[in-house]
Image (cartoon, rainbow, N blue to C red):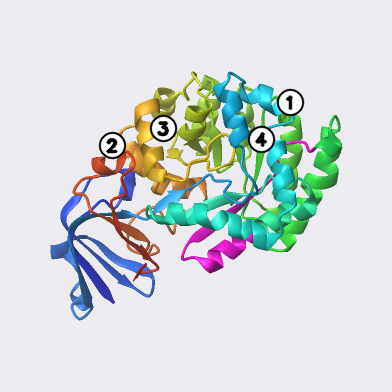
């Protein structure tokens, strides 16, 4: 048993960033036994090892609930094209965008994908991230999609981190299936899902519902196959237009709808009814120089849980800082400090279906937390280019 004391505790229990000024955490066997005021430490913990944290702030370990960190190549050239005035849609329709990353990803085996992803993963871990989601979606063949997921699983063995995988073969139509979207769904997406599930590679199924990607009817086919396998679903929805993807996701009681700049009132209400999480991705909003913001006020009013994530990917959000993401969510979308911290902890855990184990510092949950060289949560959100992490605790052990 170990007693962590002399700390300011932002447990995020109940989803708030309120702090206990003289707090303590008791851990044993990788689990949290107690979290609260130091005066409330259970009597039977008296003989545990004591760790003095010097009055530092302690939060749950951060969770990046939407990433594409496993991929090959980069899209720096497209960055230059956007600077010259090209839109995301124009780049995609000219053969750039997601499809351009596919070629770079397909030539890498599992070892190459792991080697490419490790620096991005290490950057996130260095900022207190303890759990992240990793999507496929840049292979677009059965074999290449599953190799991406195999690489994601290997990363979890190489670093002290928890990885949730999402199968995103319905991300784009590869060139060999151009004009045959439905054939691609039937011949690659669904068979690959079944194979990945049989191998234990898939924690959730995702898709991209957009005019440049897949229609609601096509995504419904993917979701039907996921339901047959008992897999939860997520969705890239309402990023560039409102096709009703969020409502489709909500009807399936999906984990989260992500992006949501064009989300309308019906989608907001449907997400609220379903209990699905709205994952906002300010990095992509910033890189694409978008002007339409997600409807934060409507989401708040409806009680939709809001998470935020890096959307780390080579094209539209080459971002490997969840701390900077929090600042972007506050400055660009108007989230409060408490919403930013909840959005990278308890609500991010909910977006992955892991809220019973992670996302807050409470008895019975996994002992994953971050120790910061700051005194209040606002300092994690307002700084730019400054990492105040003092230590990351994973399974009750200091990393």
Q: Nearer the viewer, mark 2 or mark 4?
A: 2
Residue that label 3 marks: 303
- Report, in whole angstroms, how far the alpha carbon at label 2 lies from the one at label 4: 32 Å
- Report, in whole angstroms, how far the alpha carbon at label 2 lies from the one at label 1: 38 Å
Residue 317 placement (x, y as % from top left): 53, 37
Classify residue 61 as left or right of residue 41.
Answer: right
Say which mark, if any, is on residue 94.
1
- Secondary structure under tag 3 reads loop
Classify residue 159 as left or right of residue 381.
Answer: right
Q: Which residues are magenta?
A: 151-174
Q: Earlier in the sequence, mark 3 or mark 1?
A: 1
Say which mark, if any, is on residue 382.
2
Labels 4 & 3 near each other (Cβ < 8 A): no
Q: Quadrant of the N terminus?
A: bottom left
Q: Nearer the viewer, mark 2 or mark 1?
A: 1
Q: Quadrant of residue 219?
A: top right
Residue 360 placement (x, y as % from top left): 35, 54
Say which mark, if any, is on residue 208.
4
Residue 244 placement (x, y as % from top left): 63, 25
């Amino acid at each position: 048993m170990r007693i962590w004391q002399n700390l300011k505790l932002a447990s995020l229990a109940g989803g708030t960033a309120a702090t206990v000024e003289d707090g303590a955490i008791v851990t044993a066997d990788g689990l949290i036994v107690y979290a609260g005021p130091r005066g409330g430490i259970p009597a039977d913990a008296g003989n545990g090892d004591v760790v003095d944290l010097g009055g530092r702030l302690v939060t749950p370990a951060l969770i990046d609930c939407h990433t594409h960190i496993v991929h090959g190549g980069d899209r720096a050239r497209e960055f230059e094209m956007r600077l010259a005035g090209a839109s995301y849609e124009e780049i995609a329709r000219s053969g750039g965008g997601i499809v351009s990353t596919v070629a770079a990803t397909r030539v890498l085996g599992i070892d190459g994908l792991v080697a490419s992803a490790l620096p991005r993963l290490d950057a996130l871990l260095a900022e207190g991230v303890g759990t992240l989601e990793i999507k496929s979606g840049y292979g677009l063949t059965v074999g290449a999609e599953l190799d991406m997921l195999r690489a994601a699983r290997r990363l979890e063995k190489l670093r002290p981190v928890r990885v949730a995988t999402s199968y995103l073969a319905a991300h784009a139509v590869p060139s060999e299936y151009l004009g045959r979207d439905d054939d691609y769904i039937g011949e690659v997406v669904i068979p690959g899902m079944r194979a990945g599930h049989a191998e234990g590679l898939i924690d959730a199924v995702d898709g991209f519902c957009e005019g440049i990607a897949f229609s609601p009817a096509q995504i419904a086919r993917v979701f039907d196959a996921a339901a047959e396998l008992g897999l939860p679903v997520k969705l890239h929805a309402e990023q560039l237009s409102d096709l009703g993807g969020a409502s489709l996701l909500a009807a399936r009681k999906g984990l989260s709808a992500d992006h949501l700049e064009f989300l309308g009132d019906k989608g907001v209400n449907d997400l609220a009814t379903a209990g699905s999480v709205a994952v906002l991705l300010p990095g992509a909003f910033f890189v694409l120089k978008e002007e339409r913001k997600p409807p934060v006020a409507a989401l708040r009013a409806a009680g939709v849980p809001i998470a935020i994530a890096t959307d780390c990917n080579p094209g539209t959000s080459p971002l490997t800082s969840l701390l900077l993401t929090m600042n972007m969510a506050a400055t660009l979308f108007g989230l409060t400090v408490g919403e930013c911290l909840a959005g990278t902890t308890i609500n991010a855990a909910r977006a992955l279906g892991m809220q019973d184990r992670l996302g807050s510092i409470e008895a019975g949950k996994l002992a994953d937390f971050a120790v910061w060289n700051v005194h209040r949560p606002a300092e994690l959100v307002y700084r730019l280019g400054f990492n105040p992490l003092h230590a990351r605790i994973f399974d009750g052990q200091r990393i």
